[in-house]
Amino acid sequence: MAELEESVEEFLDDADYVVSEYEQGYMDADAALSVLEGHVDDLREEFQG
């Protein structure tokens, strides 16, 4: 379970970074969604193990 908790924490940190980059204008919406989808996929893979 500790691995899943670490994965969730990493996902949240990564998601916060993407949102921050988007809000500051460094990333457009399509790129932000693409990056977030990748992070969701990574988290899903970790969860399904």
Image (spheres, grey):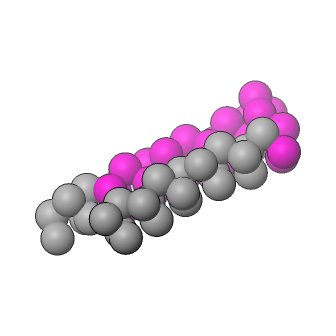
Q: Residue drawn 72% across and 46% down?
A: 34
Give x and y (percent) for residue 27. Answer: 77, 34
Count of residue discs: 0
* Picture quarter with the N terminus: bottom left
Picture quadrant where residue 11 is located: bottom left
Give x and y (percent) for residue 22. Answer: 74, 41
**In the orientation shown, which residue stands out farthest toward the left?**
2
**In the orientation shown, which residue stands out farthest toward the front?**
49
Give the side of residue 45 with respect to residue 19, left or right: left
**In the orientation shown, which residue stands out farthest toward the top?**
26
The residue segment tinted magenta is 7-30
Residue 22 part of the magenta-drawn span: yes
Residue sitting nearer the eye, 21 or 7: 7
Give the side of residue 8 with respect to residue 40, left or right: left
Give x and y (percent) for residue 32. Answer: 73, 44
Picture quadrant where residue 12 is located: bottom left
Give the side of residue 20 with respect to residue 29, left or right: left
Q: Magenta stretch mostly in which secondary structure?
A: helix
* Picture quarter with the C terminus: bottom left
Q: Residue drawn 83% across and 46% down?
A: 29
In this rendering, is residue 19 above or below 25? Answer: below
Q: Residue drawn 59% across and 49% down?
A: 38
Q: Residue drawn 84% across and 45% down?
A: 30
In this rendering, is residue 26 above or below 22? Answer: above
